[in-house]
Amino acid sequence: MTGHHPKRSPYITPEGHRRLSDELSFLWKTKRPQVTQAVAEAAAMGDRSENAEYIYGKKQLRQIDSRIRFLSKRLSELKVIDRKPADTSKVFFGAWIEIEDSDGAVRTYRIVGADETDAEKNFISIDSPMARALLRKTDGDDVTVSSPGGTSVFVVLSVRY
């Protein structure tokens, strides 16, 4: 199982889905034509073997095409979760959770899809150990999270959507 990537859950928030769709659209409609044009102009300048613009442009196109393939495939697999769960007192996808650690430090996390995790916004992946430990918990519950650094215990202070 070495080198095996854990399967990413196919869930995403509407905002996350819009961001990926916008990126795909920008790459396909704007960026790729610009780079293709630049490559064509560089190619017209003659010797391609020593033409830095041409070589760089071709490399850029490969990266853009690879990202376009990834986004197209990923967007077709994703399920947008745009409704609150039936029981909003419990932690599910999309929840904001306020937790307190054993030192009394309070942190807030939002559980989102793997494609939209963002440490600065405290968006954590539904596939992360922390999110998995928090699922279905409610105010006042203790949560134990195992990580390579050891085990941590938290208390859930609030759950909101």
Image (cartoon, rainbow, N blue to C red):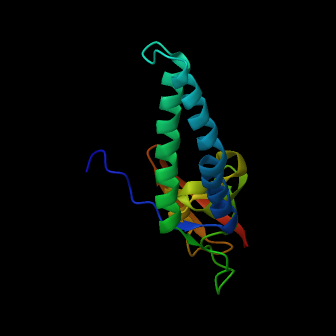
Q: Residue at x 46, y 12 (%)?
A: 50
Quadrant placement of the C terminus: bottom right
102 on left or right of 73: right
Q: Using the image, determine if residue 69 lies above or below residue 12.
A: above
Q: Using the image, determine if residue 154 lies above or below residue 83.
A: above
Counting the numbered discs, the total is: 0
Question: Residue 104: x, y in percent?
Answer: 71, 52
60 on left or right of 106: left
Looking at this view, name the residue that lies furthest to the bottom.
Answer: 86
Q: Using the image, determine if residue 43 lies above or below residue 158.
A: above
Kindly tell me whether residue 83 is visible in this rendering: yes
Viewer-closest of 50 and 154: 50
Q: Residue at x 56, y 21 (%)?
A: 53
Looking at this view, name the residue that lies furthest to the top.
Answer: 50
Kindly tell me whether residue 105 is visible in this rendering: no
Q: Using the image, determine if residue 87 lies above or below residue 118.
A: below
Q: Quadrant of residue 124?
A: bottom right
Q: Residue at x 55, y 30 (%)?
A: 40
Viewer-closest of 55 and 47: 47
Q: Quadrant of residue 108?
A: bottom right
Q: Residue at x 67, y 68 (%)?
A: 14
Question: Residue 121: x, y in percent?
Answer: 72, 51
Question: Residue 31: x, y in percent?
Answer: 63, 42
